[in-house]
Amino acid sequence: MLKVDHLSGGYGEKNIVNNATFTVNKGKMLGILGPNGSGKSTLMKLMSGILQPASGTVEIDGKELWQYATKELAKKMAVLPQLHAHAFSHTVRETVSLGRYPHQRGWFSSWSTEDEAAVVEAMEMMDISRYEHTAIDHMSGGEQQRVFVAQALAQNASILLLDEPTNHLDINHQKELLDTIKRQAIERDLTIVSIFHDINLASMYCDHLLLLDQGGIAAIGEPHEVVKEKEIREVYGTRVATHPHPELPKPQITLMPGVDRQAVEQKITKEDFSVSSEMVLYRSAAPLKTVSSAVINAGSGWFTTFMNRRVDENYRVSDTVEELTFYIEGKGFKSTDTVAMMTAVDVGQVVLENCEFEGGSIVVAVTAGAGNGTDVSMTHLKERRKKVGTVNTWIFVNGTLAEEAFLQAMMTATEAKTKAFQEEKVIDPFTGTIATGTPTDSLLVAATQQGGNFQYAGPISELGRHIGKTVFKATTEAIRRYRNPAPH
Amino acid sequence: MSKSWLAYAVSFLLLGGAILLGLTVGTVSISPAVLWNPSLDETAANILWNIRMPRVVLAGLVGAALAIAGAAFQGLLRNPLADPYTLGVSSGASVGAVMTLFFGISIPFLGSFTLPVMSMLGALLTMLAVIGFAKMVDRSMKMETVILTGIIFSSFLGSIISLMIALTGEELRQIIGWLLGSVSMRGWPYVQMALPFIVIGSFLLWLNRRELNAMLFGEDRARHLGVDVRRRKMVILIGGSVLTGAAVAVSGTIGFVGLVVPHITRLLWGSDHRHLLPLSFINGAALLIVCDLVSRTIISPTELPIGVITAFIGAPVFAFVFFRQRKGVA
């Protein structure tokens, strides 16, 4: 256990670290974050005993740092500094073997089997055994870094202090190194403190994070308590956006460039949509921020091509995504840049609506088939046979939408669609009740992210009101056209 | 393991050969058999034991001392240009010696040993001054501080030597000859005088072989590995200074050995001080014995100062090893 209590210190008279207090428990990993010059390395030097604190204490297992002899301290705590150039070079094995220095005693300091085992194991863990007899100055920065990590591991200390361990490493070795260190922390119950440059890596691997700002602790806690947009922006002085890791409950940040997106100024209108019997297609001049439940590129992202493709009633393909991707590429579009939906409905009957209002405008496109009308509250009652009919709704917004606006737009649009089903008295043939939609409806909201800002899109907001009205109108019209197809 | 065994075998073989040549070759050629059977040739045995043997042993000790001190200083200061003279201790020793010659000092009871004793005194005072000053400047005695302090002291002391040379007038040869270094006409007393210092100094350095390995990565790193850097550094500085002072006192400032033998040894056998220190010791001894042999035979009967020969032989050897190594790597 490592306990830092009201620690202050620096070089000469000037304190660089001010009044730092925190504790790291066994088996835990603490990440130290902070901009350049915030005192990360100084804090590390104070903790490792290279610098004398001006005030405050560092305790290891209940004993203050200065009470340990240098060798005893090295048995308790291993330190990985930043890489430096060296005038003379050791081989990999010699370098890793030095990690055993604190464990050797006497004038002749015989090399024990335990020393040998620790060195071999450390080299294996860092995947450097095959370089054993190579001089380290003939190795790349990344390889050298792994050699020094192996040296620190061979030291067999219960506390590990790391100063940017992933420096010089490619992403694969960054991950492997941190995996190894993390595994060691868990298996050997190590206490780890590490400086990180990369906030996202730190968030992923550390149990706790400490954010330093001008020598003081700006935030400390679990990653979600520290990696916050406001904190990071204030401490680092840069624009970032935070969002959850897609697979892990750990926050991640994304940098926001200071140069604004050079988007082509554009206004989407229904006249820009091309309609054929095969598909409804919209191609945007600049990528649009999109949230959808499409077949290709569902979820959120930035896309320029939007496709609602008609397929045959009897379309049966084992891998729909693959077939549709192939189709998109075949049409000369990029599948990575295209959001695509499918329907068996005649897409020639698509309803396109423009709606202008204060601060922005929207375009709504709906293709509907009501043959499959379903009362969602009753769907659990019966197995149903699939019929033609699905409602694909697109909403394009000329404006800037916040995250919540996207979700609210989807809710508003869904409610409007349900209301249209009700108005048009679409009946669920299996239950005889009014349908709320079809079992396979899709929805897409895309925004130019230029022009007017829309924080919300619920029915209370200007944008929401117009989405509700326009989607209702378009869906109603689409259902009517489905029932009485207009000639092309 | 097998590599270091080979290193020691080769080094000892070279040393053995050097000693044998040093004893037998000269204005009077002596058969090696006289070595174990003096009755074979009384005159030859006399030359061998009273003139050649002390000369070869002294050359070997001086070469060994300078080489091991150079290896330790290069490692400690992490500077390939460091040598035993970097700290300025040798300049102190030289000032002591040159002063003795300049003022014609002769201390009673010491007689002809006034010079080496004065020289050692100069070395000791300089060592204390350099370490004391460095410590005053920077309590943790960073290596940069030590190197700069050494430069300050050696240039200052060097100017005192130059001053004395300038004021000497016609009879420069004695002083210049001493400064260039020589092991001739010293005899066993000089060996006895230097031996204890060289044994102690070498032992102090050898005790710190693993610490020197750790310090190659810098002082902070060594400390993290558990090295008591401040104490070890002091011991190494004192050990190296004792060796340098003793060597300079008995033979003058012989250049090149302390700079290049460690480099050649490192290039051939690696920079692990556990082996680098003893191997430099052996190779330094061998090189200086050979150089001494050449200096007294090449234009015999005139003897050249040994300092002229060390670089004359040493530089091409170094160039050869350096070239081979770099080519091998590339």
Image (cartoon, coloured by chain):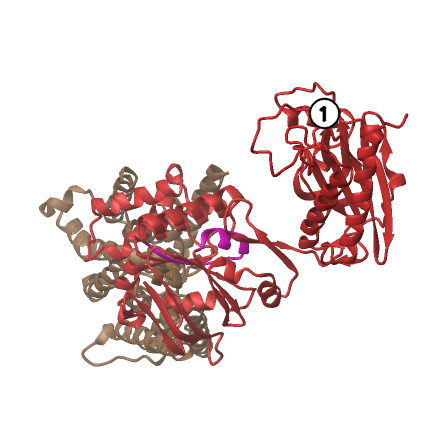
Left/right placement of residue A165 relative to residue A434 reads left
The magenta stretch is A190-206
Left/right placement of residue B237 relative to residue A479 reads left
Chain letter for red?
Answer: A
The residue drawn where x is 87% and y is 39% is: A272
- For mark 1, what is the residue? A388
> Can residue A484 be seen in this snapshot?
yes
Q: Colour of chain B?
A: brown
Q: Is residue A273 above or below residue A279?
A: below
- The residue closer to the viewer here, B306 or A317, is A317
Q: Is residue A252 above or below residue A62?
A: above
**At which x and y percent is residue B287?**
33, 50
- The residue closer to the viewer here, A139 or B192, is A139
Most extreme residue toward the left is: B39
Looking at the rendered structure, the secondary structure element under dot 1 is: loop
Q: Is residue A119 above or below residue B122?
A: above
**At which x and y percent is residue B48?**
19, 51
